[in-house]
Structures are given as C-alpha cells and as structure tokens.
Amino acid sequence: MAKLSRRKTKPRRVVLQRKTTEVTISVDFNIDGYGKTDIQTGFEPLSHLLTLFAFHGLFDLKLSAQGDLEHHIIEDIGIVLGKAFRDSLGDMSGINRYGSFSATMDKVVVEADIDLSGRPSMHREVSAGNKTKVENILAHETFDNTDFNFKHAEEFLGAFVQHAGISFVYNIKSGEGDLHHLLEALFKALGKALDQATQIDPRRHGVPSTKGVID
C-alpha cells in the first residue's frame, strides 16, 4: 500500500518578526519540517522545551529573542510563534484539524488534546492519583533550580494558543516526578498533537468545518 505523504504543494512556512520598545523576536516556522531547530529565547528552560516541541512535532523552528528579559518577553515569544503557526496554515484546507497524544516522561504522563478551531482556549485537568502532589509541584517547584516555573510555561502557552487560534486541553494523568518531567511531557505531547492536527488528509477537500470556514 502506498504511504500517504504529509507534504502539501504550497510551502507552509512563515517568517515573522515582532519588534517593540522592549524586545525583538524573529521566528522562522515551517510546519512541514523535520524537527530542525535553532532556538535562543534568553531562557534556557523555555529554549529546551521549544526544542522538544518542534523536534517531536517535526516542525522546523528558528527563533531568536533579544531585549528586556524582565518584561513579558515569554508572552511576546508566545504571541509571535502563535501568529507564525496560524499564518502558516493559510485557510486550513485539507488539514485533520484535531490531534491527541499522550507523552510519557519516566513516571509522568501528560495528554494533549487539540482542535484548530479558530476559537482559542486552554484548560488543565489533573487526573493523577496524587492530585495534591501535582498541584504542589505546579505551584512551588522551578525547572532544574532555575527561576523558570510553571507560571512562566503557562504564560507562553496562553499567548501561543490565543494567537494560533487553538482549543487546547491537557490532562496530567500521572505526576510521579518533578516540574522538569511534567513540562517536558507537556511540550512533547503538544508537539505531537499539533503534528497530527496539521497533517493533510488527501480525502479532505476544503476546510474541515461544516461551516466552510475556520476563523
């Protein structure tokens, strides 16, 4: 049986720059990539997590952020990457639209569920047996003894989801680890789910919505 191609004739690649009085952020994003990355956010944990996101999502991503690291640059990175993601999809003709993936990192399992709906939202569930332990990790731990914490990760994710037009629900299904494990599993699962959602189904003609449009 012939293998279906994940390619689309028109390149789904976008180059964007966001420049404010505080920061300059450049992004080169290609949905139909091979997981090649060159990411410099100014925050080593975020650069690491975005590398995992792109590698497992098979997105090519070059990202450089410079400027005032104290004033919402993490949100700005989410804004510009979200816009690049949304713009690269064009009118969304032929895409699967939905994606779901559970990633395991040692004893941690995080499931990401995606709808490229054009109606951005983000919701977290914790179904792990020891929910109190997980919530304590999210509230108090930092990433490998750096200043990067879960609020920083959610600040990025919230901006990314908002500007990409994604409905995103994730569930921490097992949390027997630390913040490093939880965030790595989350970003890997997000990348894999978005890879599913953005792939082209050759049977689909037009936009995957009964309304005929996603906006």
Image (cartoon, helix red, strand yellow):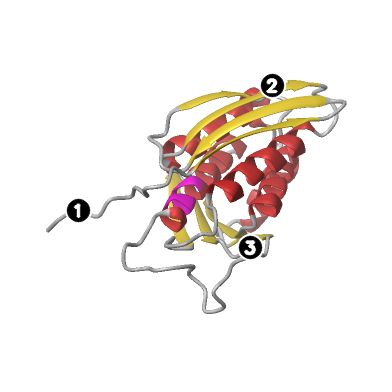
Mark before the other along the chain sequence, 3 or 1: 1
Picture layout, residue 48 above or below residue 104: above
Q: Position of residue 197 (x, y in %)?
A: 46, 57
Label 3 vs label 1: CA separation? 30 Å
- Give the residue pinned by disc 3: 118
Part of the protein shown in magenta? 191-195
Quarter of the figure that contains the C terminus: bottom right
Looking at the rendered structure, which numbered label has been put on residue 42?
Answer: 2
Label 2 vs label 1: CA separation? 40 Å
Q: Secondary structure at mark 1?
A: loop
**Residue at 65% of width from left, 57% of height from top?**
165
* Front residue of 135 and 67: 67
Residue 92 visible in this rendered orientation of the protein: yes
Q: Main secondary structure of the magenta part?
A: helix
Image depth: mark 2 or mark 1 in front: 1
The amino acid type, in three-letter code, at marker 2 is: Gly
**Residue at 73% of width from left, 20% of height from top?**
66
The amino acid type, in three-letter code, at marker 3 is: Gly
The amino acid type, in three-letter code, at marker 1 is: Lys
Q: Position of residue 186 (x, y in %)?
A: 54, 46
Q: Position of residue 208 (x, y in %)?
A: 48, 69
Label 3 vs label 2: CA separation? 30 Å
* Front residue of 24 and 145: 24
Picture layout, residue 101 above or below residue 51: below
Question: In which image quadrant can residue 44 be found?
Answer: top right
Q: Give the side of residue 67 with respect to residue 191, left or right.
A: right
- Give the residue pinned by disc 1: 3
